[in-house]
Image (cartoon, rainbow, N blue to C red):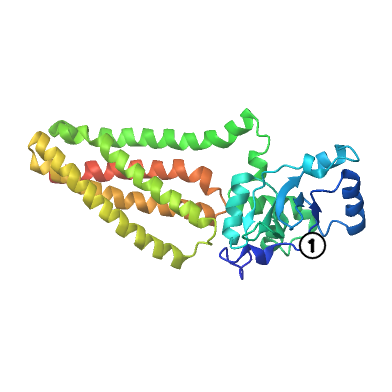
């Protein structure tokens, strides 16, 4: 949204009031006559149908209206299931509707489903890029849908080859990180030979790190839908995520320490594994927050790229902390 706007604003403030509501009892001919006489308002995306009490009862696709028989009632042509926003919805709620249903407009209704207004993607375009020229309209749509969760050009009619071009580079990140991890593990082969129990729990520690990083990344990506990242925002969330990950690390580390000691009866390896889990969880939360924030700031797609990059950095950091601590203490 524009700088002075926030996603917590009521969506009704952004809804168009110049819509044409069609009575369900009208025929196709009567409907077309009404549209010609009253006009369509500034824009028209969908025709919404109401009953005698002005309650929303359906949506009429333009194609059905134009191909319907002259005397046919629009009640027979309309689609009865309509996704509608309540008047209490916020702009952020509207964004989630656009992402979920992928429609270009939604009606806004009150508690009794009376039609109050229409909110469409064009309104978000104007708020986001109100200074852009008409020549930039297509790019404006891309920016809008990128902000609310997806890019049209990447998802509309994407061929297998195009999908491969988009997704394969990020799999290379995973391959690269896996290769780097194998090289790092090779450096610590002496440590592994001295204490095989360290090797036994590598998969568990990696899994814990990846789980926390994905959790942090998911929360961050969702937050970035409605927030412009700043240094103050980043530091505040970093402190919060650090505290949370520390508590997760201590609880998981204590539990795994007990498991290792009860299984092998070796206190020092048990403490090493438990302590490394604390460090791993904190670093995982750091990457889970930092990677999508950086990608968003640099105008890259955090949803597509954040996962592979976050996991890659988390895995490499996990191995360094895990085997590094074991080499120092064992």
Say few, some or many: other residues with alpha carbon within 10 Å of mark 1 (under 14 / 14 to 19 / 20 or more).
some
Compared to residue 269, the image places residue 285 above or below, namely below
- Using the rendered view, name the quadrant where residue 261 is placed: top left
The percent coordinates of residue 83 (x first, y second) are 64, 48
In the rendered image, the vertical position of residue 125 relative to residue 190, given as above or below: below
For this rendering, which residue is in front, 16 or 150?
16
Q: Position of residue 195 (x, y in %)?
A: 14, 34
Q: In which quadrant of the rendered view does residue 123 lie?
A: bottom right
Residue at position x 70%, y 43% in the image: 80
Disc 1 is placed on an element classified as loop
Residue under numbered circle 1: 18
Residue at the top extreme of this rendering: 160
Residue 146 spot, x, y in % from top left = 61, 50
Q: State the residue at coordinates (53%, 61%).
A: 227
The quarter of the rendered structure image containing the C terminus is: top left
Residue for point 34% across, 42% down: 316
Is residue 329 or residue 208 the one in the foreground?
Answer: 208
Examine the rendering and report whether any part of residue 235 can be seen: yes
Side of 281 relative to 77 (left or right): left
The foreground one among 256 and 58 is 58
Camera sees residue 150: no
Q: Which residue in the rendered view is the most extreme toward the front?
A: 52
Percent position of residue 179, x then y: 37, 33
């Amino acid at each position: 949204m524009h700088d002075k706007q926030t996603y917590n604003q009521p969506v009704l403030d952004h809804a168009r009031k110049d819509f044409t509501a069609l009575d369900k009892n009208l025929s196709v001919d009567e409907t077309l006559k009404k549209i010609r006489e009253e006009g369509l308002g500034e824009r028209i995306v969908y025709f919404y149908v109401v009953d005698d009490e002005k309650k929303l009862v359906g949506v009429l696709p333009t194609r059905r209206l134009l191909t319907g028989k002259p005397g046919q009632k629009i009640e027979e042509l309309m689609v009865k299931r309509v996704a509608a926003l309540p008047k209490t919805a916020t702009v952020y709620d509207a964004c989630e509707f656009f992402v979920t249903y992928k429609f270009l407009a939604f009606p806004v209704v009150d508690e009794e489903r009376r039609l109050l207004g229409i909110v469409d993607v064009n309104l978000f375009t104007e708020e986001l890029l109100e200074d852009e020229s008409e020549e930039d309209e297509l790019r404006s749509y891309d920016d809008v849908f990128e902000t609310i969760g997806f890019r049209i050009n990447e998802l509309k009619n994407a061929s297998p080859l195009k999908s491969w071009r988009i997704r394969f580079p990020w799999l290379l990140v995973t391959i690269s990180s896996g290769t780097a991890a194998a090289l790092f593990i090779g450096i610590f082969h002496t440590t592994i030979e001295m204490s095989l129990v360290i090797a036994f729990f590598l998969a568990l520690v990696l899994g814990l790190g990846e789980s926390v990083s994905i959790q942090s990344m998911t929360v961050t990506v969702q937050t970035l839908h409605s927030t412009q990242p700043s240094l103050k925002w980043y530091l505040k969330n970093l402190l919060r995520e650090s505290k949370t990950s520390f508590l997760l690390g201590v609880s998981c580390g204590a539990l795994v320490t007990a498991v290792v000691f009860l299984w092998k009866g070796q206190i020092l390896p048990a403490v090493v594994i438990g302590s490394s889990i604390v460090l791993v969880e904190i670093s995982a939360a750091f990457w889970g927050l930092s990677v999508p924030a950086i990608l968003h700031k640099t105008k890259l797609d955090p949803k597509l790229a954040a996962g592979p990059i976050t996991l890659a950095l988390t895995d490499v950091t996990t191995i360094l902390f895990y085997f590094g601590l074991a080499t120092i203490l064992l």
